[in-house]
Amino acid sequence: MELERAIHEAVLEVARQRRDDLKAVAEDQRLTEDLGLGSLDLAQLVAMLEIRLGLDPFSTQTSVAAVRTVGDLCAAYRRCHAAPVRAAAGGSRS
Amino acid sequence: MIETVELTLSHVGLGDLNEFALLNLFASLQARVLTAGTGKTLSEIADKDGRGLYPAYYRTHLRVPANRPLARHQLWRPLRIGLEVRTFGRMLLESTCVAGFPEEVAEDPEQWTDSLPILDGSNMFIVEGEDEEQQVAVPAAGCVARLPSLTAPPESMDRFRRVRTEGSLDPGFDGPLRCEGSIPYPIVAGRDAAPGRNMVFSRFVEIMDHAEWTLLAERVRPGFPTALVACRQLLERETFYFGNCRSGEVVEAEIRGRLVVGPPEFHGPATAAISVGILSFFLELYQRGSNMLLAAARVRKLLKVPTARQSLLRDAERLLFQYGAEEEAAADSDPPSEGSPHGARTGDS
């Protein structure tokens, strides 16, 4: 649940940059069509989650393009959490 | 990474360093930084499924001090380029590049200042060949060098979103240098783009310069003497990139600008030239037919006239009287003070 909450918060934070009236996000909402996230927004969302969760599901396990909904995103991070691929690309991180 | 290159014919033709060449040198060095130690080249970066990726530019911002024009760097002379690339996550890059004579560029990026030409670039990794909707992807492990990381989103992202929504860097701008209709630029195979490929991002500079030239020399009435149009010297260009074109297509440039009286200042040995004003432009580039917004930019250029060309100076005075304003609005300039450190870099680790 912690993981899901962190992901929902991050999605909401990024989506609010385009729709500031958004109060919450739901598992079945589509990131692009329903929440209006563009390429740069998705890149930002993944970067934020990598920093906050220390997980990187997209370099070996899942394609960003395969993630359509908030639920897909949660599932990708759940799988990664179970068989962790720690974020490795960045250098020093504070 | 620091590199010293000799400026050759392939960089600058028979001329001096220009914006197009500097952008290409920057991108080439960035490619080496991204793949350093990986055993790969930029064209071998792929995602986990083997799809080719490339770091698409979504913003560049070049600032050139008035007393350090790019043209000071001449053919067959060494140019030193320093580049620092940082990542935000694994798909976003923020780069800072500085250029100067070999003795001027310090090894330590913290010492780079805008007393030299300095260029910031923002990229995101995009899947090759996805022209309709850009698709971001994470490079597979081992494809990209380990680079310093940012812990907060770069400011360029917010600006990108705002410009994308508003369609311009200053939608309310109302300068007197404007024309009816857009200025077309046909994309020619070989000259502007390789057959079947998008234009390289630096080509947008040429399109914008063409629009500027056409506006001043051919569209505004009274027009600027062409010899005076040639006296422009780049101070700053900030460009946001939203799309691209291929050969056979046409770019339509919307441009408007103003001329602002600047403090007279001599340049070069024995007061060889004098600056008479600053030209500011806002441009939006569209793809003809689809009307897709391809790029939006703001540009500032110094109008610097050789003191030996007294007739041109009279023309400059006349045009300042006809088009000029007394002072430049802060909104479209806002340059950092000369000599300030380059890093307004929140979240650097």
Image (spheres, rainbow, N blue to C red):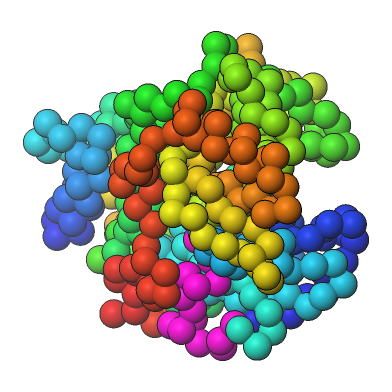
In percent of width and height, residue B284 lies at 51, 29
User: Residue B143 location in percent, x, y?
Assistant: 63, 67
Residue located 56% across and 88% down the image: B107
Q: Residue at x 38, y 73 (%)?
A: B340
Q: Nearer the viewer, residue A58 or B301?
A: B301
The image shows residue B91, relative to residue B260, as above or below, that is below
Q: Is residue B121 visible?
A: no
Q: Is residue B103 magenta?
A: no
Report the side of B48 relative to A44 (left or right).
Answer: right
Residue in the foreground of this view, choosing between B194 and B226: B226
| Relative vertical location of residue B280 with respect to residue A76 in this rendering, above or below | above
Give the residue displayed 42% in from the left and 27% down from the top. B175
Q: Which residues are magenta?
A: B105-124
- Horizontal side of A92 relative to B28 (left or right) equals left
Name the residue located 53 percent from the left edge and 48 percent from the top edge. Answer: B276
* Residue B118 image point, x, y percent: 53, 66
User: Is residue B110 in the magenta section?
Assistant: yes
